[in-house]
Image (cartoon, grey):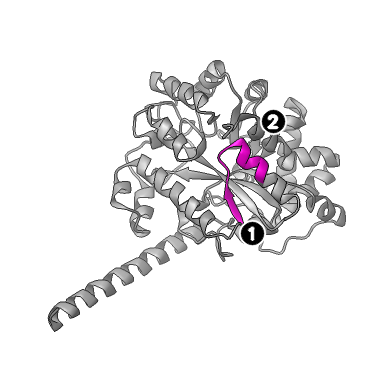
Amino acid sequence: MTRRAVAVAAGAAAAIVAGARVGEALVARTERRLNVVHRPPPYPASDRALALHATLDVVDLHADSLLWGRDLLVRGDRGHVDVPRLIDGGVALQGLAVCTQVPRKINLDRNDDRSDDVLLLALAQRWPPTTWRSRLARALHQAARAQRFADASEGRLTIVRSRADLATHVSRRASDRQVTAAFLAIEGAHALDGDAANVDVLADAGFRMMSPTHFFDNGFGGSVHGVAKGELTGRGREMVERMESRSMLVDVSHASVATIDDVLAMATRPVVASHTGVLGSCTSVRNLSDEHLRAIAATGGVVGIGFWPEVCCGDDAAAIARSVRHGVDVIGVEHVGLGSDFDGAVPVPFDATGLVQVTDALLEAGFRDDDVRRVMGGNVLRLLAENLPER
C-alpha cells in the first residue's frame, strides 16, 4: 500500500473506533437514565431472611438485559442484571427477554408502530445490517449474544432450552452456588416479521416464551398500550397453536384485555404473565384483574409479580410483597412468582443482588418458609420442568 492509502485506512479505522465509542457512550447514558435503582447496594435483610435466601433457587421470569450492550459476564456499574450480580442475588434462573421494537416516547395508554427506538440502539451498538429492518433478525442477534456470553462464562452461565438442560443445571447448582442460568423469551410477536411460521425459527434459536404484543398493536393481537387494543387475530391464533406445538409458553404481559381473553380461551397448555401487577393491590392499566388471575391459574400457569412502582404502587420490597399476597389470596401460592422487569427501562428498589429483600418482605408479611420458596422460584422451576421440550 502507498503511504496515502495507509493514511486513509488508518483514518477510516480511527473514525470507526471513535464512532463505536460514541455509540457505546450514548447507550450507557440512556441506560443510566432509564434503568434506575432506588437504593444502591448493599441491601440489608434480617438474619432469618439471609439464612433462608441462601437455600433458595430464585427464578425471575423477565429482564431486558440483552438490549443494552453491556458485557453480562462483568459486574456492571449501571443497570440491574449481570452474571456476577445474579449469582450474588441467589438467582438460579433468569428469564432474558428480547425486545425488538419500542415506540418513541412510549406511554401506557396509546402507542403505534411508526417509530422504532430499538433501531437507534441497534445502530449505536453496531448490530448487523440485517437487524436494521428485520425484527426477527434482531431477536436472533440477541439470542446469539446470550449464547456467546454462556460460551465465554467458564460454566458460570448456562442457557436452558430443555427439561434436560434444566435438570442438569439444578443438580449442578445444588453443590455449586456460583453458577446461574437463563432462558430466552420474546416481547411481542412483531418479532415474527408478520409470519406465524417464524415461530419455528425462534423455537429453533432457543426461545421458550413469547407474548403476542408489547407496546403497540400488531398483526397478531392487541396491546393494552395500543391504539385499537383489539383481539387475537387469525394469525395470532395460528401463532399460539404453533407455540404450543413447540413447547413455547404464551406470555400475556402487555396484551389487551381482549387478546388475553382469546389466548386463555384457546390455550391447551399453561399460560404465563411474566411481569405484571394485580389490580386488587394496585390500580394500573398494566395490571391483571382477579378474573384473569384465576383464568391463568386454571391453565396451570404462573403470574410473575413486577418490581416497579407502576405495577406495585411502591418503591420497596414491601410493595412487592403486598402484590404477592393478593395474588396468593386469589389463586393460591403455587401460581405466583417473580417478574422483576429488571433492565426494562423502569425504576426498581434494588438490583439483582437485593432479591433477599423480597424474601425478607414475604417473611415479614407472614408467609411460611415453604411458601416463600415456591414464590421465589419453585413455582417457575416446576412449570418449566413440566413444559419445556424434553430435549
| Res. 138 in view | yes
Circle 1 is placed at which residue position? 85
What amino acid is at disc 2?
A: Gly
Q: Nearer the viewer, mark 1 or mark 2?
A: 1
Q: Position of residue 323 (x, y in %)?
A: 71, 37
Up/down of 142 relative to 260, above or below: below
Q: Position of residue 215 (x, y in %)?
A: 45, 37
Q: Position of residue 188 (x, y in %)?
A: 45, 35
Task: Identify the magenta region.
Answer: 156-168
- Confirm whether the magenta stretch covers residue 56: no
Q: Measuring 71% from the left and 46% from the top, which residue is drawn there?
A: 171
Say whether residue 3 is left or right of residue 57. left
Spatial CA span between label 1 and label 2: 32 Å
Q: Nearer the viewer, residue 1 or 118?
A: 1
Dividing the image into 4 quarters, which one contains the C terminus?
A: top right
Please rate how many residues cluster around mark 1, counting C-alpha atoms within 10 Å: few if below 14, some from 14 to 19, many from 20.
many
Up/down of 152 relative to 328, above or below: below
N-terminal-most mark, 1 or 2: 1
Up/down of 193 relative to 121, above or below: above
Q: Which mark is residue 280?
A: 2
User: Secondary structure under badge 2?
Assistant: loop
Q: Nearer the viewer, residue 344 or 322?
A: 344
Q: Measuring 56% from the left and 59% from the top, which residue is drawn there?
A: 153
User: Secondary structure under badge 1?
Assistant: helix
Please rate how many residues cluster around mark 2, counting C-alpha atoms within 10 Å: few if below 14, some from 14 to 19, many from 20.
some
Q: Residue furthest bottom?
A: 3
